[in-house]
């Protein structure tokens, strides 16, 4: 039976060429065509089903952002987290804390009205849910600044969920007298990052969509066709957030997922719609009935979208193999939005096109529609458009083109060799952020806030009391060793008690005598010190350093203390923690498990393309080219964010590193996104190869028929990514710049130059698969005579 056969009522409408289409010779399309007929038949039911799905999705999507967090940088089971757990369990320290900074322009902290304001807030804070401690701090250098530290018995993520309620304890800015109040620290910074991210996603979307609409009008020449990709994008994103909702309930989910879902959702939804609508209009221009046009659109462009979506999902699923809450949540979010976009593109969009039919070309833009309206082609004969001439020109000098492209990509990728990563702090927030302003005030007024503190915990091997003579001797040795280390400013320990005003410094032997005899209990200061820093078999030592967070010196000091701390004393087990240690443990686990994600993404993508193209060398070539695009993206990130070039244009201050999660997230996301255009191009080239069995002609025709649509798709994706480049969060800027660079390189240099050049060199081996005969050798006379 011919797959172009139509029901009796429509057969008269079919053009003669549809019945004799050479495509029906290829059985590989039959599943796609049958599915297309199914969509056409049940088009109204599918649209109604989607209306119901979206009504439900909208409800859950609105709830998702309330369950996102800005943290996720602790590695459970790591040495730093073990120290944190010991500090909480044995020394009864709060699990998390918030700090409210008070600063007046004219009134001193000692004034009665200032004290009333502090005490009023402290009383309210003590009555707040899960508050464990409320501590009023000292006075700042200007005598007009102080702070109140509020400790909680729950973790930072839980505090962040109740942040809005806690903010109600702070009067409105106009009522803050005599001091202005700033909520900062921990959950406050994470909460503001989440809130700013949500607002910036909305602002970026609002900027990108009108620009994308203008471009789509230019691409299609009709308003009906131009609006449909945007409609699909606006439907896919709420569905993705609805899919994420149960995940956010079950596990900590990073607020970075907002940017990922928005960029990927808008980008791939528009791209997939563009390819579907473009192919549907081409089929209509060939004279096919709507039913046949839908069937062949899904069989060709639909197949490419399915495999393209799978490659993007493979990239995001690679993040799950790192096995961290942060990467897992981003991976699930990215995969969810791709699933939503693919399902919408292969169900809702063709159902809508089945209803709209030839009215897809309605509401034409004067003059423009004539230049963009598809026309009946000459089948698989050579054409003379720009992309055809470019392909022929490239294939005439493939070696020269490959060398030229490799030089460009190498120059872009070279800076990636000096890539440094770090964990973004409050500096990622805009300067107007209260949390950032509050922390800046603390650092200015209280010099101790500029120092990096390291938490050292020493535990006896046999569980014996730390205040025994033998253990105190070892603890004194450890304390003295810590004091001698480079970059250490001070060490606070029960064996390093500061001199009492007007009195002598207590010696090591004197302290041991006081502790072992119990006479220290007569000295209130020593009692307070012991209560704060000793518990049974465990002693806490606070080390203050002059290093800065994420600096090489700070990290080297942590490594040194961990490597040699226990060796300095034989009877104590020494663990090192603190904020820098938490970040280091997280980063090293992250990048230590990155190779398994890389291996999975590359191998899975290779296998998927092997199945799709029935070729060994095409998937291998595609994987290598994607690696080049990602490396070029890394190089651009280093130039912009690590070296600071373009910081004035993008309005940020370089921290000297790239956020630690960005290289891993971009690799997994970009590997699939870059493969998008490779799949669309190669699927069309393969289609031409199946008809002509001429490698040169297939490459030229494939590039001719997809060059403009891939360029338009890339341009639309770049519109989305650029809108995120000019947001205020540095992390969001890094995502935007990285994706912009990769897509720009991939859709221009790689797909337009490197693909035809390498396919020309490989010739008939492009289509070889082990176990099958190599296609016969061809003589491309056209190139020789061109």
Image (cartoon, rainbow, N blue to C red):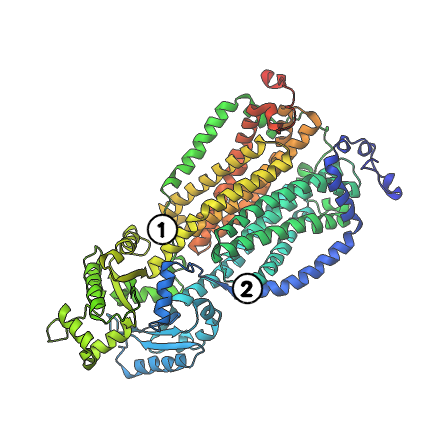
Query: In the rendered image, is residue 651 in sight?
Result: no
Instruction: Point out the tag, 2 or 1, that comes first from the N-terminus.
Output: 2
Question: Looking at this view, is 756 or 538 the one in front?
Answer: 538
Q: Which residue was labeled with disc 1?
A: 654
Residue 300 to residue 506: above or below: above
Residue 400 to residue 553: above or below: above
Query: CA gap, disc 2 to disc 1?
Result: 36 Å
Where is residue 657 drawn, in percent x and y? Answer: 36, 49
Write the residue at 39% across / 45% down: 640
Question: Looking at this view, is 11 or 304 the one in front?
Answer: 304
Where is residue 685 drawn, in percent x and y? Answer: 64, 31
Which quarter of the rendered picture does the C terminus lie within?
top right
Write the residue at 16% across / 72% down: 511
Query: In the rendered image, is residue 115 in sight?
Result: yes
Residue 265 to residue 16: above or below: below
Label 1 CA crowd tier, 10 Å (few <14, some 14–19, many 20+):
some
Question: Looking at this view, is 188 or 223 the one in front?
Answer: 188
Residue 250 - label: 2
Q: Quadrant of residue 617?
A: top right
Q: Which residue ends up furthest to the right in the rendered image?
A: 8
Write the residue at 77% across / 33% down: 24
Horizontal side, residue 54 vs residue 599: left or right: right
């Amino acid at each position: 039976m011919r797959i172009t056969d139509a029901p009796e009522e429509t057969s008269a409408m079919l053009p003669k060429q549809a019945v004799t289409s050479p495509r029906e010779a290829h059985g590989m399309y039959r599943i796609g065509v049958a599915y297309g007929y199914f969509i056409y038949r049940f088009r109204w039911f599918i649209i109604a089903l989607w209306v119901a799905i979206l009504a439900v999705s909208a409800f859950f999507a609105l709830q998702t952002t309330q369950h996102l967090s800005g943290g996720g940088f602790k590695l459970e089971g790591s040495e730093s987290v073990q120290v944190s757990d010991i500090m909480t369990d044995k020394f009864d320290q709060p699990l998390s804390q918030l700090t409210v900074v008070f600063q007046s322009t004219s009134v001193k902290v000692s004034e009665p009205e200032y004290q009333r304001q502090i005490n009023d807030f402290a009383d309210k804070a003590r009555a707040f849910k899960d508050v464990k401690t409320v501590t009023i701090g000292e006075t700042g250098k200007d005598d007009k600044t102080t702070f109140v530290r509020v400790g909680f018995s729950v973790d930072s993520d839980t505090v962040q969920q109740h942040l809005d309620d806690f903010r109600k304890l702070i009067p409105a800015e106009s009522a803050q007298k005599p001091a202005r109040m700033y909520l900062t620290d921990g959950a406050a910074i994470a909460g503001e990052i989440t809130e700013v991210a949500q607002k910036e996603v909305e602002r970026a979307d609002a900027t990108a969509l009108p620009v994308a609409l203008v471009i789509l009008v230019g691409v299609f020449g009709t308003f009906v066709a131009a609006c449909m990709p945007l409609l699909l994008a606006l439907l896919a994103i709420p569905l993705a957030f609805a899919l994420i909702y149960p995940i956010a309930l079950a596990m900590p989910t990073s607020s970075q997922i907002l940017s990922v879902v928005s960029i990927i959702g808008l980008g791939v939804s528009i791209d997939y719609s563009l390819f579907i609508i473009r192919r549907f209009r081409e089929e209509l221009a060939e004279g096919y009935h709507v039913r046949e046009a839908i069937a062949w659109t899904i069989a060709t462009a639909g197949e490419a979208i399915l495999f393209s979506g799978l490659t993007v999902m493979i990239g995001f699923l690679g993040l799950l193999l790192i096995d961290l809450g942060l990467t897992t949540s981003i991976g699930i979010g990215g995969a969810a939005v791709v699933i939503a976009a693919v399902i919408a593109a292969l169900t809702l969009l063709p159902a809508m096109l089945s209803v709209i039919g030839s009215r897809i070309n309605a509401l034409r833009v004067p003059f423009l529609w004539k230049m963009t309206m598809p026309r009946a082609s000459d089948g698989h004969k050579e054409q003379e458009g720009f992309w055809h001439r470019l392909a022929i020109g490239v294939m005439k000098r493939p070696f020269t083109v490959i060398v030229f492209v490799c030089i460009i990509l190498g120059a872009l990728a070279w800076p990636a060799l000096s890539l440094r990563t770090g964990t973004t702090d409050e500096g990622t927030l805009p300067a107007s952020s209260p949390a950032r302003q509050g922390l800046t005030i603390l650092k200015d007024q209280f010099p101790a806030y500029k120092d990096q503190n390291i938490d050292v915990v020493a535990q006896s091997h046999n569980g014996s009391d730390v205040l025994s003579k033998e253990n105190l001797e070892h603890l004194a040795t450890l304390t003295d060793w810590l004091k001698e280390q480079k970059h250490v400013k001070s060490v606070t320990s029960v064996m390093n008690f500061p001199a009492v005003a007007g009195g002598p410094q207590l010696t090591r032997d004197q302290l041991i005598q006081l502790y072992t005899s119990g006479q220290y209990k007569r000295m209130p200061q020593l009692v307070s010190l012991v209560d704060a820093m000793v518990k049974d078999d465990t002693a806490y030592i606070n080390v203050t350093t002059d290093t800065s967070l994420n600096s090489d010196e700070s990290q080297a000091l942590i490594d040194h203390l961990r490597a040699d701390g226990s060796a300095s004393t034989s009877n104590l087990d020494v663990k090192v923690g603190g904020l820098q240690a938490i970040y280091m443990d997280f980063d090293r686990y992250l990048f230590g498990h990155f190779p398994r994600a890389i291996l999975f993404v590359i191998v899975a993508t290779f296998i998927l393309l092997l199945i799709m193209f029935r070729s060994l060398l095409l998937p291998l070539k595609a994987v290598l080219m994607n690696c080049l695009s990602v490396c070029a993206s890394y190089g651009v990130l280093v130039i912009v964010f690590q070296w600071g070039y373009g910081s004035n244009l993008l309005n940020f201050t370089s921290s000297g590193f790239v956020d630690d999660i960005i290289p891993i997230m971009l690799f997994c996301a970009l590997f699939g996104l870059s493969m998008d255009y490779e799949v669309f191009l190669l699927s069309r080239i393969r289609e031409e190869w199946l008809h002509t069995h001429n490698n040169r002609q297939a490459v030229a025709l494939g590039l001719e028929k997809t060059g403009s649509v891939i360029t338009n798709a890339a341009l639309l994706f770049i519109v989305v990514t650029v809108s995120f480049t000019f947001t205020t969060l540095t992390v969001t800027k890094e995502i935007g710049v990285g994706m912009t660079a990769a897509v720009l390189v991939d859709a221009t240099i790689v797909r337009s130059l490197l693909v035809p050049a390498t396919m020309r060199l490989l010739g008939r081996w492009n289509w070889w698969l082990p176990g099958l005969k190599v296609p016969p050798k061809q003589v491309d006379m056209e190139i020789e005579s061109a």
